[in-house]
Image (cartoon, coloured by chain):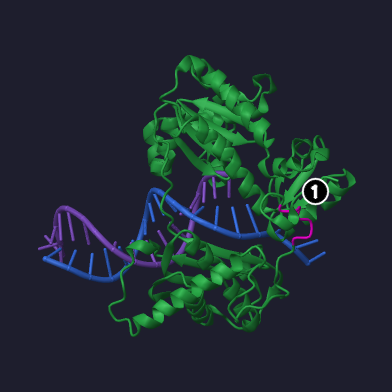
Chain colours: A green, B blue, C purple
Amino acid sequence: MFALVDCNNFYASCERVFRPDLEGEPIVVLSNNDGCVIARSNEVKALGVPMGAPYFKVRDVLETSGVKIFSSNYALYGDMSGRVMNIIFSFSPEVEIYSIDEAFIDLSGFSPDLIISQMNTLRANIKKWTSIPVSIGIGPTKTLAKIAAERAKKDLSLVGVCMLDEASKINSALSLTPVGDVWGIGRAWNKRLNANGISTALDFANQRTELVRKKMGVTGARTWLELNGTKAYGVETQPDIRKSCVSSRSFSKTVSSIDELKEAIATFAARASERLRAEKMVAGTVTVFLLANRFDENAIAQNSSATIALDSPSANTAEVTKCALAALTRAYKKGVAYKKAGVSLFDLSSMGSLQPNLFSISPDRENRAHNLQIAIDKINSSPRAVRDMVHVGARRQKSNWHMRQDMRSPRYTTSWRELACVT
DNA sequence: TCTGGGGTCCTAGGACCC
DNA sequence: TCTGGGGTCCTAGGACCC
């Protein structure tokens, strides 16, 4: 059996940890740029505000209903996530951290009779030690555990833990689950399946396997197997080696000038390389992409990108920035109103296994660049430094493309300056 | 006026190999 | 008239996840 531990309304719950006065109050959390609703407390779900709704469209409803609105605070959510995950690891080492708010546990070592009570304890401990509420679903495959977790959330009589261990329970849960809510069935397949009269997970599970394989490829076939109780996915306790690293932003206003784009791209290049260095990795290629308004059919044709290989794999901000700016010049089209831009790093490898460049002109110079980078990182991470105190000159501190983030809560757990005070 | 960011996997088609 | 068989690698696009 597998368990899925799923935090309830995770970001909204995080906002309540240091604001107990918000317990029972309606809360939403907005995406970067305060663009969309990406988390809702139960009270807001009850108001009928959909997931992903553009803020400007639901602003009036939220305000008249007295909903508390937060910009996203990833420093807080990331840290709270780590605390929840640590508690789960204390129950079993066979854990896969699937996302910021979800983890699978391989229960093969657990005695079947004790699973429910142990999961109840886990749930209670997480609540007690972090104040984050979770739901736990248990099933013979990961996909069924996902469905069980949804049932645990929706059916209040289950008190947060749902185990699907018998055919009758599984069938009943499948019949209550819309096919589009199944893990692996997204928007596109949901539409096509519905058009063919398949509306619940049970309808889908009852299709002929050859038909599913033919129409939906191997991914669809795996989902079908998992719904029918055959394991297609295991618990991956080793995190995958990362294959790419992206830093990107939508602009609050469109940007057409190459100089402004340069500042943005230099910032993204720095962010992405910084993240890579933290994971002791280096990149082989740098891609810059420029996107026009994605809600305008005609504008999408103006999207462009360019990829350039680094001379030798690197995560050095200066190197990556230089490369990214060159790629920008290639991708840039004059006169286009860009809405979003970003830098992706590909061909990643670990720093340790680095192959030196056979044609390197000056290994000594590369060494010095490396040491400089270490010194800069050290300065910037010192407790007294403001964010990015030392940075590449191509960036600028204040620009009009920067993010809107007007309603962010304090970084209670990761910044000394923003520590909660009891008075 | 306004619409997130960061990922992975699969497939089809083209170019290439012997 | 007729034109092999078996591969790999790369890329773009589409689908999915949170």
Between A332 and A80, the one nearer to me in the picture:
A80
Name the residue located 55 percent from the left edge and 68 percent from the top edge: A378
Percent coordinates x, y for residue A214 in the rendering: 38, 41
Image quarter of residue A169:
top right
Quadrant position of residue A360: bottom left
Q: In the figure, A287 relative to A218: above or below?
A: below
Residue A409 colored in magenta in the image: yes
Q: Which residue is mark 1?
A: A421
Label 1 residue SS: loop
Main SS class of the magenta portion in the image: loop
Q: Residues within 10 Å of mark 1 (few under 14, many from 20)?
A: few
Q: Residue placed at 65% from the left, 48% from the top? A: A77
| Residue A142: percent from left, percent from top | 47, 33
* Horizontal side, residue A230 vs residue A374: left or right: left
Chain of the residue that carries numbered disc 1 in the rendered image: A
Q: Which residues are magenta?
A: A405-411
Q: Place residue A250 in its image quadrant.
A: bottom right
On screen, residue A200 versus residue A231, left or right, reads: right
Q: Nearer the viewer, residue A175 or A148?
A: A148
